[in-house]
Amino acid sequence: MADVAQLAGVSSQTVSRVSNGFPGVTEDTRAQVLAAMRELGYRPNSAARALRRGEFRTLGVITFSLSTMGNIRTLEAIATSAAAHGYAVTLLPVAVPTQDEVNGAFSRLGELAVDAVIVIMEIHLLDAATVSLPPGVQVVVADSDAGDRYTVVDTDQAGGARDAVRHLLDLGHDTVWHLAGPEGSFAAQRRANAWRDTLRAAGRVTPPLVRGDWSAESGYRAGLRLAGDPDCTAVFTANDQMALGLLRALHERGRRVPDDVSVIGFDDIPESASFLPPLTTIHQDFAEVGRLCVEGVLRKMREDGAEHGTTLVPTRLVRRASTARRRT
């Protein structure tokens, strides 16, 4: 630091302010110091800064699955938002969805240099009676019903599902079939409950629920069954990947979309506009979920807060060519 200060013609305190991103340094001086850092190959010692400032500038992220589009995009958004705040991210994957594995991930937090943790957990494994948190580590949870015990940020799963079902009913369909996600998923449960409640509120018959596992292959298998039912004219799928498999099955069985069957998905993945036909779907704002998770956990760190409750991020209906008015 002294060498950088000498080359830049400033004090060591100014170099410290620049390296730590503190205000009170003019842009010309900041550029001068950064140029000296590059010339000398100087890099601030993060371990020393952590000891001095009492923080590591790192957030831990615990997640069960990286195979679902929602988790991947939420993790990406968390990493982007954390970097904007000057924080790095340490990923702690949970190999299998068991209570022991979740406990193990939380236990490893005590061995790692993290200031706080964000949990992306669809599975109902956040048991307050058995999960032990390292002292002083703040937690925010994405995609959970644990708002009575933690700070939770989630998409408005129920609101999005209601919009999907109402869209199909407004197109003149007598009822709506549902291709749901796996039983252990909070998001799948919320979407299925909203589908059922919306049909009942409209006085419509509720068809038998068909379940998949989020994959396109499970959507294809379910689609082969649904294609054989001539009364099935509208399907709400719990994610876009299963909708992709469903579209293939309907095509193979000669059921035209949307002429014979309207299909709506959930997520609005980037590829959904390129499905054949382009998929009507419910858009989730993963970037906003990630941003709110990071800002929430940083706020809890600053305020040493124990706030609980759930923040819901709104969804929106994206109309494309896979839904149409029912033919009579």
Image (cartoon, rainbow, N blue to C red):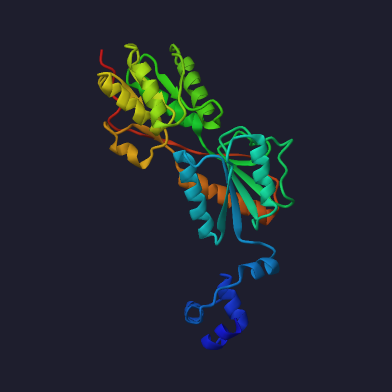
Question: Whole-percent x and y of residue 320?
Answer: 30, 33
Left or right of 153: which side holds 212? left
Residue 39, given in percent of the width and then of the height, sits at 47, 81
Give the residue at x 39% y 15%: 175
Instruction: Tell which of 41 and 166 is nearer to you.
Output: 41
> Which quadrant, please, contains the C terminus?
top left
| Residue at point 32%, 23% (across, down) | 249
Quarter the N terminus occupies: bottom right
Rendering coords of residue 55 (x, y %): 66, 62
Furthest residue to the front? 95
Query: Would residue 278 be seen by someone viewing this image from the given angle?
Result: yes
Is residue 258 visible to the viewer in this orientation of the structure? no
Q: Is residue 75 above or below residue 130?
A: below
Instruction: Tell me where residue 279 sits by quadrant.
Output: top left
| Residue found 68% across the figure and 41% down from its top | 103
Nearest the eye: 91 or 83 = 91
Relative placement, left or right, of 182 versus 228 is right
Residue 237, percent from left and from top = 41, 26
